[in-house]
Image (cartoon, rainbow, N blue to C red):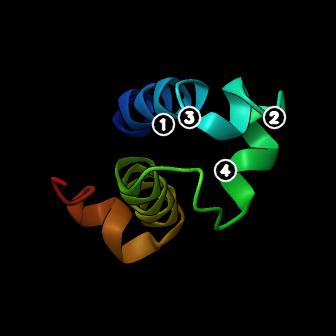
Amino acid sequence: MAKSCKGLAMELVKCLNESDCVKVENRPCRECAKEMSPKISSECVGLRETYFNCKRGQVDMRARIRGNKGY
């Protein structure tokens, strides 16, 4: 994993582990991250979108030359 997105990934996992989807329903983080459940806080949804944009920026050649945007 690239260093620029690693911090976002760790924050996303931490946020999902504290959500009701993982705590109450005992579902894995990966499964909870994929769905648009009301049991996931808006903070986690925002982190998920930011992480997605970070990973997309690594694949986009124009962004690779310029570097990832500071989110």
Labelled pair 4, 3 in contact (Cβ < 8 Å): no
Q: Amino acid at mark 3?
A: Ser
Which residue is label 4 attached to? 33
Question: What is the distance, in whole Å, between disc 2 and disc 3 at their CAs?
Answer: 10 Å
**Dot 2 lies on which element?**
loop
Is residue 43 rendered to the left or right of residue 33?
Answer: left
Which residue is label 3 attached to? 19
Q: Which mark is residue 12?
A: 1
- Which residue is rendered at x = 35% and y = 76% of the image? 62
Question: What is the distance, in whole Å, between disc 3 and disc 1 at their CAs?
Answer: 11 Å
Counting residues from the N terminus, which is met first, the one under dot 4 or under dot 3? 3
Is residue 28 rendered to the left or right of residue 1?
Answer: right
- Which residue is rendered at x = 22% and y = 64% of the image? 66
Q: Which mark is residue 45?
A: none
Query: Closer to the camera: disc 1 or disc 2?
Result: 2
Labelled pair 2, 4 in contact (Cβ < 8 Å): no
Tell me where residue 60 appears, x and y as whole percent: 47, 72
User: Vertically, is 15 above or below 14?
Assistant: below
